[in-house]
Image: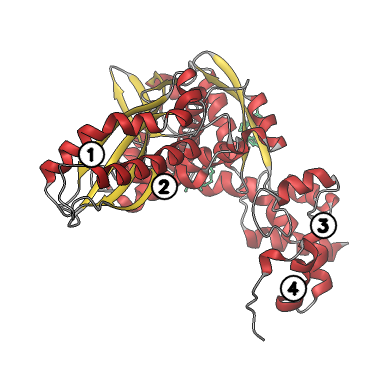
Amino acid sequence: MSASISGFSKLSKTKKIDWIVDTYFSNSEDAKSILKQYWNNDVKLQQLHDEFIENTISNYYLPFGVAPNFLINKKIYTIPMAIEESSVVAAASKAAKFWMDRGGFKTKVISTTKIGQVHFMFYGNVDKLKKFFKTVKPKLIKDVASITKNMEKRGGGIIDIELRDKTKDINGYYQLHVSFETLDAMGANFINSCLEQFAKTFKNEGLLFDGFSEEEKNIKIVMSILSNYVPDCLVRAEVSCKVEDLNEDKNITAEEYASKFIQAVNIAEVEPYRAVTHNKGIMNGIDAVVLATGNDFRAIEAGVHAYASRHGKYSSLSHAKVENGIFTFWMEIPLALGTVGGLTGLHPLVKLALELLHHPSAKELMQIVAVAGLAQNFAALRSLTTTGIQEGHMKMHLMNILNQLEANNEEKQIIIERFKTQAISHSAVVDAIHNLRTKN
Ligand code: HMG
């Protein structure tokens, strides 16, 4: 059967679903009822979700959890997290509780500059291009005045425009490399609108510039777009305590633990196979808060991983040391986040998440998100270097296994109790449920 269709986007939601279930599913009624099961009864709320994206046929739920007890710069937060993976929220909460008694997390926003670029081709004399750029720069800024007016009133706007020669990489390739301050907005629309206006002005003024030959006047704009690489939108998060205060686990001394922990971080600094997993653990915390607060986790992921490769080799985002008996664990990470605009004013749960965080500014949110990442990394490394990851992970994953096995509440209670003293594995839980059911 042909599975292509023209004009799908123009169909009503009902007709879209009809086409999908009839084309792809052996039991179209079952498929339809699963899709409808996730619709919201509140018609207005459902419509809001339908209109977030295109061709919406249902909602895809993620659990929305909270991790309490985060002491950040002497203020206590409960952090909202939207994530599907078991043990992440528990790990964050456990790390928060641990550091609460040891001075908490200290954070600092280092810089907040965002970048956008107009990419263009020019095959003429570079000195003439530089002269043209100098002449046209004030007009570039003047022509975006209507777009930047409100942002400037709030203290943000365009920081600078540079002409960058990239002809060593591609013949004829140059950029207008623009830096922005977008304050509490992530700023994607603002930046892209400015860039598209820069491109228009640059192209049009080029046609009129006396210093160019007829050929040189034809500057070819390739594209105008913000960059999700934001190495100058940087935040630092840190925890520290006396080595002896790390003593929590009876099976290992505090000194041994600190030393193993630092070795684990050092390995992630030099070994890309380990660094990717190490940073994945950090992103467990980062993405969950980024999602809960309505920010763009794809942009954050792309920017963070590029940053982790900035020295030419993929490496750990976090670092650890012991100096003068003090254990310090820290991370600097690029995070371009917004607390106004985008989903932040639209999605009811995002609004709730921001209220839970005391309506943070973008700078405050950068610090909270970085802390969630560091806490997550701390919890994972602590497990990895002591009990191993599976013990805690499987403890949290037990409920998923029980749900897969369609255990009822009574069975769940019995099995959870039994596995408090027994190692959890998928097969051990299957056997336990089987034994329980055959006994009854
Ligand atoms: P535990 O010591 O067995 O927990 O740790 P506990 O029952 O003694 O409770 C201690 C505290 O942990 C609790 O305090 C909570 O804060 C938290 P309380 O609330 O009682 O005052 N906690 C929970 N919070 C919510 N719901 C729960 C819960 N249980 C404990 N059910 C724990 C258990 C899982 C926390 C621990 O083993 C741990 O931190 N493990 C690490 C888990 C982890 O990192 N998971 C991420 C997924 S694995 C991964 O993808 C990344 C990785 O590959 C990255 C890397 O390689 O670096 C590992």
Residue highlighted by disc 2: 302
Task: Determine if residue 222 is in view.
Answer: yes
Closer to the camera in the image, 130 or 340: 130
| Relative height, residue 214 to residue 385 (above, below) | below
Q: Nearer the viewer, mark 1 or mark 4?
A: 1
Calculate the distance from the C-alpha at mark 3 to the C-alpha at mark 2: 34 Å
Label annotation for residue 37: 3
Q: Residues within 10 Å of mark 3 (few under 14, many from 20)?
A: few
The quarter of the picture showing ligand 1: top right
Q: Quick one: label 2 or label 1, which is nearer the N terminus? A: 1
User: Who comes first in sequence, dot 4 or dot 3?
Assistant: 4
Looking at marks 2 and 4 on the same chain, the residue that comes earlier in the sequence is marked by 4
Q: Tell me the distance, in whole angstroms, between the alpha carbons under discs 1 and 3.
A: 54 Å
The mark nearer the N terminus, 3 or 2, is 3
**Three-letter code, disc 2:** Ala
Residue drawn at x 62%, y 24% is 357
- Of the residues shown, which amino acid type is indicated by label 4? Trp
The reply to whether residue 319 is in sight is no
Q: Is residue 79 above or below residue 347?
A: above
> Which residue is under mark 4?
19
Quadrant hosting residue 107: top left
Q: Quadrant of the C terminus?
A: bottom right
Which residue bears the numbered disc 1? 163
Q: Which is more N-terminal, label 3 or label 1?
A: 3
